[in-house]
Image (cartoon, rainbow, N blue to C red):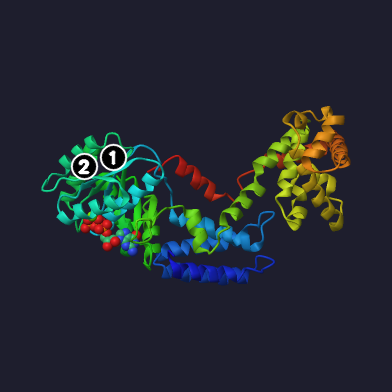
Amino acid sequence: MVLDALSSSLKGALRKIAGASKVDPALIKEVVHDIEVALIRADINVKLVREITREIERKSLGTQPKAGMSPREHVIKVVHDELARLLGETREVRLKRQRIMLVGLYGQGKTTTAGKLGKYFQTRGLKTALIAADVHRPAAIDQLVQLGAKLSISVHFERGEKNAVKVVRSGLEKFLAHDVVIVDTAGRDALSDDLIREMEAIAKTSEAEEKLLVIDATVGQQAGPQAEAFHKAVGITGVIITKMDGSAKAGGALSAVAAVKAPVVFIGVGEKIDDLERFRPTRFIGRLLGMGDIEGILEKATEIASEEELEETGREILSGRLTLRTFYQQLEIMSRMDDSAFARMFESLPMLGGAMSGMTPDQQKVSMEMVRKYRVILDSMTGEELDEPHIIRGSRIDRIARGSGTATNDVRDMLKRYEVLRKQVSALRSNRRIRKQMMEMLGKGGGEGGFDFEELERESRGGRKR
Ligand SMILES: Nc1nc2c(ncn2[C@@H]2O[C@H](COP(=O)(O)OP(=O)(O)OP(=O)(O)O)[C@@H](O)[C@H]2O)c(=O)[nH]1
Ligand SMILES: [Mg+2]
């Protein structure tokens, strides 16, 4: 596994809050300290580590767990968001027709990665070919040819040709009918003028859409300056960090590359041809924290807290258009919660919240079951029925009950409750004080406790900005 030591320390730290019933300051301080030690051991820049742990402490203690999240999940989300910031922007190398050029210093893993990428695209249905443009080391051709043979991927090479540009040009002509062409280039032991000139010439001839820098994780934090220098010299579109397996410095390499805003697109996690992974920070962090379900937790944080959803239903209620669809949306939000969160959520749901807030916990429990049942019933209705509830009579009720596996009485019961709520809401609407309160509530929606991850995803979709 990648970054085993870091992973086990982080897991250990988070285990401390596993059973906590509230976010306790002393406990958080301890956990944050453990995380700090773990990150420094993983070779992450000390200044960065301090920044991150400060933020983890501030956000864990300074913000309330969102409804439906346990203290543990709350802290995990905060830790995730900070680690995601540390890992920086993401970008995706798209599955499409394209030319890819690999660059990098000696021995970083370019040729091996060319083979891995070849397989990556080939198995995803894109006809792929390789060009051996390392004209300086004769063995480089053999290495790529062997990889190609193993994968049944065509390789273009010209033994004895000393001009890399010529090789690339003839290779591209040969592979016109291929979807993805990957160019393996020669390394140097430093970013020399000679290397820069050669990369520029190959980039120009190949018109490569992707210029990917291959860096070995064992260089640690030096990966940052290296990525920056290559970017200045030839303009890279992404970084592939190899040898993530077993390198104690992998954290340093990843974070240093992120710090110079170069997006990591793939990581190499072994010598074998399949040891290549698309780099997805969330998944990666999930593994570091030893949690397969991290995406679920993050989803919970967005879904339940979606102010927009609440705002939208709220506005609809204010406008007087209270349809079953609105009713449904509120049930939807509620049904995502466990029972305790359900109780906490009352205040923020303008409609059902108001109607149920006077209940005892026991009555609320019944209500939760009711919410789940009603949701199934509403799921069996047509769009028209949701928008125009008054058309639901006789045979429609039979059909809905059958479709949802409930009794016709349940359907009638739900419709009755909906009708009562509709009347209550319209009474509320005519109450000016309450109306004003609701307007205020809706007016201040959004913004709080920003969700960095979403922004990250948006950025990665829009490409990198630098
Ligand atoms: N453990 C591990 N080894 C790797 C990984 N990627 C590459 N290697 C090994 O690193 C060594 C160098 O890899 P190459 O692909 O030849 O590197 P290169 O950048 O093409 O090297 P030059 O052509 O000499 O500049 C080989 O022994 C590879 O097996 C990886 O992700 N994990
Ligand atoms: Mg090579």
* Residue at x 56%, y 72% (from the top left corner): 30
Q: In the rendered view, would you say 20 is above or below 207?
A: below
Q: On the rendered image, what quadrant is the N terminus found in? A: bottom left
Q: What is the x, y in percent for residue 102?
A: 28, 48
Mark count: 2
Pick the front one: 184 or 239: 184
* Residue at x 66%, y 44% (from the top left corner): 307
Q: Is residue 456 visible?
A: yes
The response on whether ligand 2 sits within 8 Å of label 1 is no
- Circle 1 is placed at which residue position? 208
Q: What is the x, y in percent for residue 104?
A: 26, 53
- Circle 2 is placed at which residue position? 202
Q: Is residue 393 visible?
A: no
Q: In the rendered view, would you say 250 is above or below 308?
A: below
Marks 2,1: beta carbons within 8 A: yes
Q: Is residue 465 left or right of residue 52?
A: left
Q: Quadrant of residue 275?
A: bottom left
Q: Quadrant of residue 142?
A: bottom left
Which is nearer the N-term, disc 2 or disc 1? 2
* Residue at x 74%, y 35% (from the top left corner): 325
Pick the front one: 294 or 254: 294
Q: Amino acid at mark 2?
A: Ile
Q: Amino acid at mark 1?
A: Ala
| Element type at mark 1 | loop
Q: What is the x, y in percent for residue 11?
A: 54, 68
Pick the front one: 266 or 129: 129
* Residue at x 76%, y 34% (from the top left corner): 381
Q: What is the x, y in percent for residue 338?
A: 73, 56
Q: Is residue 239 left or right of residue 367?
A: left
Q: In the rendered view, would you say 319 is above or below 18?
A: above
Pick the front one: 191 or 4: 4
Crowding around mark 1 (Cα neighbors within 10 Å: few <14, some 14 to 19, many 20+) is some
